[in-house]
Amino acid sequence: LKARAWDARFEDARTEDGTRVEVVANLGNTAHARDAVSRGAEGVGLLRTEFLFMAHASLPDVETQEREYREALDALDGRPLVARTLDVGGDKPLAYWPLPQEDNPFLGLRGIRLALRRPQVLRDQFSALVKAADGRPLRIMLPMVKDLDEFRAARAIFDEVLRELGVSRDGDRLQLGVMIEVPSCALLAPSLAPEVDFFSIGTNDLTQYTLAIDRGHPELSGESDGLHPAVLRLIQMTVQAAHAHGKWVGVCGELASDRQAIPVLVGLGIDELSVSARQVPMVKARLASVSTTRARELAALALAAPTARDVRRELEASQ
Ligand code: PEP
Ligand code: MG
């Protein structure tokens, strides 16, 4: 047998001093999982399942969904898949699920709020995901959760599905977590941490709701910065609460692939970065160039700054 040539792409991501930080990929299409792995992704950290739903003319049934999730899991070959349940509403319409006209769709029926109003859709999606995984590592996360009540309502449906399928949640191959996208959820992380399996911070929405700036606003985009110290403090609170209960925390928003932000996130204790597949090599290289001690110093610097502009200035000056 020919020994497989050593290829740096497939090395586990580590900081300069050897701390493991998982680098995984964001996907909108299960067919792209193979490409993500070939670029060195250690798994998928955010499968945006709404794109899968958008590609169909009507709600895909359990078998159709199962087939598509299986495609991603097969390509991952034992690496973990973090799948987000359907996240529509706000800026993500679904043609065959018309929503009432709302004055503020970003503050209206979206994410888990919508899913809990049509529990059969959530039930079917849980069922398709668990069947497709068939014992392989699967982590399911819920979008736009604002507090423990919403998590518990979704978990009750999840547990019911598992009972029906005769699947146990012993061990850590099957996890149920929460996205931190709404500031209330970060502030209340100590109450959620004992009950969730993990947190994944969606910095795009978390920044939008913390700074009250529409994430797609054409004029305000320059001011919408995830490195804002207010957002960083919410990230810090989330990590502290999670780690106090032995749970892991990822970041799956744009901030995870921001060169200046990466050391700060590591310094705050983030365990996993999920980025677009083409950015995986850059993120791994960036991690390898910073020690955890240095990352903690940079995080402290960033947390103490009064504005996002000051954070960036300080980070630039301390290069
Ligand atoms: C986020 O809000 O940061 C996130 C990852 O979710 P999306 O961008 O799909 O809303
Ligand atoms: Mg989001």
Image (cartoon, rainbow, N blue to C red):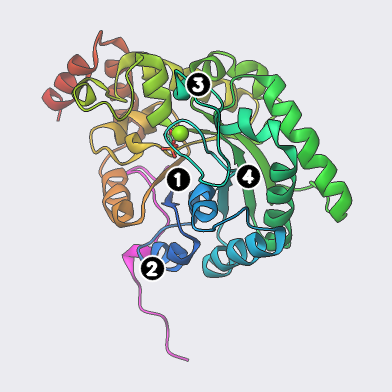
Binning the other alpha carbons within 10 Å of mark 1 as few (below 14), some (14 to 19) or many (20 upward) gives: some
Tell me if 100 is positioned left or right of 12 in this view: right
Instruction: Work out how far the residue at label 2 is from the one at label 1, CA to CA, in angstroms.
Output: 20 Å
- The location of residue 261, given as percent across then percent down, is 29, 32
Circle 4: element type: strand
* Numbered mark located on residue 20 in the image: 1
Closest to the camera, between mark 2 and mark 3, is 3
Query: Is-magenta flag for residue 44?
Result: no
Which amino acid, mark 3?
Val
Check if mark 2's residue and mark 4's residue have beta carbons within 8 Å: no
For disc 3, the marked residue is: 182
Q: Residue at x 52, y 69 (%)?
A: 75
Q: Earlier in the sequence, mark 1 or mark 4?
A: 1
Check if mark 2's residue and mark 1's residue have beta carbons within 8 Å: no
Q: Earlier in the sequence, mark 3 or mark 4?
A: 4
- The location of residue 74, given as percent across then percent down, is 58, 69
Q: Foreground: 63 or 317?
A: 63
Instruction: Work out how far the residue at label 2 is from the one at label 3, CA to CA, in angstroms.
Output: 33 Å
Q: Which residues are magenta?
A: 1-19
